[in-house]
Image: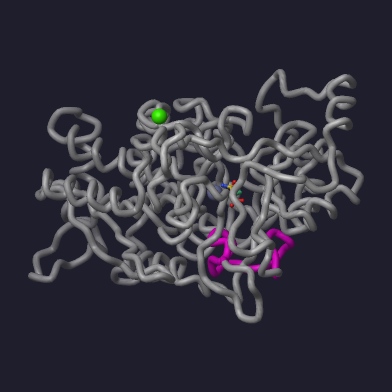
Amino acid sequence: MRPPTPRFRRPNGRVTTAAIAGLLALAVATPASSNSTPGPDARERVHEYEVTGPRTAAQRTAVAATGASVDAVRRDSIVITADAGQAERVRRMGYLLRVLPGPPDRGDGRKPTPFDFPPADAKYHNYKEAMAEIDADIAAYPSLMSKQVIGKSYEGRDIIAVKITGSAKAAGAAQPGAAREADGEKAAAKPEVLFTAHQHAREHLTVEMALYLLKEFGSQYGKDARVTKMVDSRVIWVVPDLNPDGGEYDIASGSYRSWRKNRQPNNGSSSRGTDLNRNWDYKWGCCGGSSGSTGSETYRGSGPESAPEVKVVSDFVRSRVVNGKQQIKAAIDFHTYSELVLWPFGWTYDDTAPGMTQDERDAFAKVGTSMARSNGYTPEQSSDLYITDGTIDDWLWGNQKIFAYTFEMYPSSAGAGGFYPPDEVIDRETARNRDAVLQLLENADCMYRSIGKEQQYCT
Ligand code: LU0
Ligand code: CA
Ligand code: ZN
């Protein structure tokens, strides 16, 4: 087992004695009030806290075991979202807690529009606007893009997958084992790559990332050589909104609610929601990386794929197995925040484990590190942060052998906007991942090429 890696996100993030004194003064048992809008149920009242003290992945995992979500990690502190009970349990572990400011008020003094972003964040797309934008892209590039409704969310919203591919035939048309098309003509299988976004309701920038990809692949096809080559030689799938119900709930009142989960009711509990990124069917609930309490931010659900949204996307991924072969070779699941490129496993601290050989781990790390060089994020194995189980990446890799990464997007810290960066950053922060996305596409036909083992694994 490898010792957990301490991480420095910001050189000035060090906590000095004076800062500790300040934090002590600010530490409170229960915040009297907060900017965050309470949900209809008192149990839904959560706050972000800076927790000073946890230094190792094991310590951070113990904090997460209270049921709080860990939102950001620094060398000797973390940021969590917790309700009052969870915060108290963390405090009893001997750590210092400071309540962070709630979500920003971007109302501009204007009357909020129900189910829409506040006026100052109007460039973010709510569900309806995102779907309209996607339909417009498909109308603009009908020979490249098409849309499939792959299922419904708990509240009945469409979950869609957009397919993007050029008309060019894949290289090496006579590849052995290539899929036979319906008309009986033998066509080479193009490697497929999956981009997913918005498992966590409050991570709205990730929907913008998905919208950016559609625009970029459509508008740059035939203009930019790299984009053209990848659109022609790959099948690109974009699932732009895995959690439409949670996303709409987060913005519905006109003030952000800091909501993370879906909106599915839980039997015998007034607390709603499953953490979608703890509900996937690989080592579900195995390892202390999720919670069995319905009120927790990381509630894993009543069983694997109990969340309809996870079932829908899992079924879609399984449907890409053709002639016994999974066509999707690589994936990125977009989250915010912290500026990280993460790879599996999350369920174990070990670099290699049953289901992850040294070569596989090396290919993950090589491509992950190269993508991180291009976007300035920090590359690491997911469990370097803290243990998680039932995550999409662990399932995509452990169950489907898809090289799956998580990108934790902008910003790097809570202080720089946390889950609610202003809409002015959307263009810059989505384009920031352009090169990394192209790199993954370029590697997708043989991830082992990155470690010089193409001959061994890809012929
Ligand atoms: O699901 C999560 O806890 C992720 C991190 C894992 C992918 C390791 N962090 S987030 O919830 O803050 N996006
Ligand atoms: Ca703005
Ligand atoms: Zn997330």
Name the quadrant containing residue 100.
Answer: top right
User: Residue 356, position in %: x, y?
Assistant: 58, 55
Return the x and y of residue 161 as percentages of the image width and height: 29, 58
Whether residue 430 is visible, yes or no, is yes
Residue 389 lies, with reference to residue 433, above or below; the image says below
Is 459 left, or right, of 184 in this rendering? right
Vertical relation: 350 (above or below) 428: below
Q: Nearer the viewer, residue 263 or 310?
A: 263
Q: Is residue 84 left or right of residue 235?
A: right
Number of callouts: 0
Q: Looking at this view, is 302 or 436 the one in front?
A: 302
Looking at the image, is 202 positioned above or below residue 413?
below
- Vertical placement of 18 versus 94: above or below? above
Q: For the point 70% across and 64% down, which residue is it?
A: 291
Horizontal and vertical percent position of residue 122: 36, 37
- Tell me which residue sits at (58%, 61%) in the image: 275
List x then y, in percent, for residue 223: 15, 28
Q: Is residue 153 magenta?
A: no
The residue stretch that appears in magenta: 273-292
Does residue 436 show up?
Answer: no
Q: Main secondary structure of the magenta part?
A: loop
Question: Who's the residue at 42% across and 37% down the image?
Answer: 110
Give the image quarter of residue 311: bottom left
